Amino acid sequence: MYQVYVKDKETLSKDLVGEYADADDAFDKADELVAKDSTVKYVIEKTSGKFNSYGDLLTDVIAEN
């Protein structure tokens, strides 16, 4: 599962834009966001489906700008 987030510069948080089963779909969504607003910052994360000892979902950052 791939998740696309948009970063917020002021609050240093990230908002979920969408979840995609295919990496190409996630990259297409990120490209679409950049095409609408060239100043947008995004992060694409891949979830492994595994959790750490605190119950947090483990993710790997695939791409960000």
Image: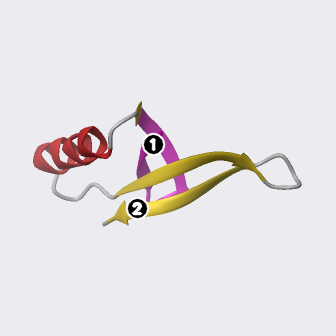
Q: Is the residue marked by circle 1 packed among few (<14), some (14-19), or many (20+) residues within 10 Å?
A: many
Q: Is residue 7 left or right of residue 23?
A: right
Q: CA distance from mark 1 to mark 2?
A: 10 Å
For image coordinates 83% across by 46% down, the residue present is 55
Q: Which residue is mark 1?
A: 3
Q: Nearer the viewer, residue 22 or 36?
A: 22
1 w.r.t. 6: above or below: above
Instruction: Find the magenta span and give its range.
Output: 1-18
Amino acid marked by disc 1: Gln
Where disc 2 sits, the SS reads strand
Q: Where does the image place residue 54, in percent across and percent down from the top left?
A: 87, 52
For image coordinates 88% across by 55% down, the residue present is 53
Instruction: Kindly identify which numbered label has been placed on residue 54.
Output: none
For residue 11: magenta?
yes
**Displayed quadrant of residue 19:** top left
Which residue, as the protein is rendered here, is positioned at the far right?
A: 53
20 w.r.t. 4: above or below: above
Q: Is the residue marked by circle 2 packed among few (<14), some (14-19), or many (20+) residues within 10 Å?
A: few
**Precedes in sequence: disc 1 or disc 2:** 1
Q: Which residue is mark 2?
A: 62
Total numbered circles = 2
